[in-house]
């Protein structure tokens, strides 16, 4: 599949079969995140794979946006390992974790695995439930699984603002 087709057809799946992902599929998804670019290639990402009924039950105590997915990955970054912009001290950890998540999300779709990127989770509950150290910052929860036969994108999936509203050349107009 060509990249644009992949990117255009992928949608947030909110209805899954109950089948956990096979280790081979998980490994391919993780490999896509592993080759994602990060600031100065410091690779601060840390990924927690949840692929058992027990771990998913714990996840459900941290978010209502689990969509009964049989598998999930929590993408975090190590605050101590991020490249930092010298001008203002901005850390690229959030950006790095987001790029990693995007790579994994697109790889999953190519493998026939549906995902939904969830940011609506309680980070304090997630820290406690998953024993996440203080220097590890949770960014994105990628719930995933094989789409149910009747899964479909939300109506807004194919609605986009005109490109001229979101792109400027030469000067930023607003």
Image (tube, grey):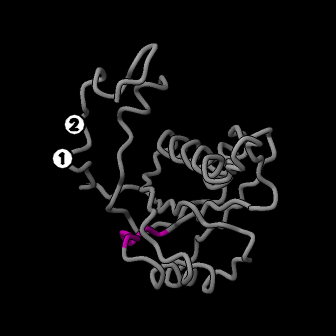
Q: What element carries label 2?
A: loop
Give the numbered dot on residue 68. none
Q: Is mark 1 on a helix, strand or loop?
A: helix
Q: In this view, does 78 lie to the left or right of 159?
A: right
Q: In this view, does 135 lie to the left or right of 150?
A: right
In depth, the one of 82 and 2 nearer the eye is 82
> Which residue is drawn at the image coordinates 32% and 58% (left, top)?
148
- The verdict on residue 122 being magenta is no
Which residue is tagged 1? 155
Question: Callout 2: few (<14), some (14-19), or many (20+) C-alpha neighbours within 10 Å?
Answer: few
Residue farthest to the top?
170
* Residue 122 x, y percent position in the rendering: 48, 77
Which residue is tagged 2? 159
Which region of the structure is painted magenta? 65-70
In depth, the one of 140 and 73 nearer the eye is 140
- The verdict on residue 68 being magenta is yes
> Which residue is drawn at the image coordinates 52% and 66% (left, top)?
71
Dividing the image into 4 quarters, which one contains the C terminus?
top left
In this rendering, the answer to whether 57 lies above or below 6 is: below
Residue farthest to the left?
155
* Residue 24 x, y percent position in the rendering: 66, 53
* Residue 50 x, y percent position in the rendering: 59, 71
């Amino acid at each position: 599949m060509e990249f644009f087709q992949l990117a255009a057809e992928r949608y947030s799946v909110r209805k899954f079969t109950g089948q956990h992902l096979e280790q081979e599929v998980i490994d391919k998804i993780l490999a896509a995140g592993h080759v994602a670019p990060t600031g100065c290639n410091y690779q601060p990402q840390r990924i927690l794979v949840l692929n058992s009924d027990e771990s998913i039950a714990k996840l459900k105590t941290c978010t209502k946006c689990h969509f009964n997915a049989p598998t999930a990955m929590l993408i975090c970054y190590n605050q101590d390992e991020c490249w930092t912009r010298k001008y203002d001290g901005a850390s690229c950890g959030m950006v790095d974790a987001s790029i990693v998540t995007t790579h994994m999300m697109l790889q999953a779709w190519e493998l026939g695995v549906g995902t939904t990127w969830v940011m609506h989770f309680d980070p304090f509950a997630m820290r406690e439930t998953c024993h996440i150290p203080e220097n590890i910052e949770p960014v994105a929860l990628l719930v995933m699984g094989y789409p149910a036969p009747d899964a479909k994108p939300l109506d807004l999936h194919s609605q986009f603002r005109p490109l001229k509203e979101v792109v400027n050349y030469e000067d930023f107009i607003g």
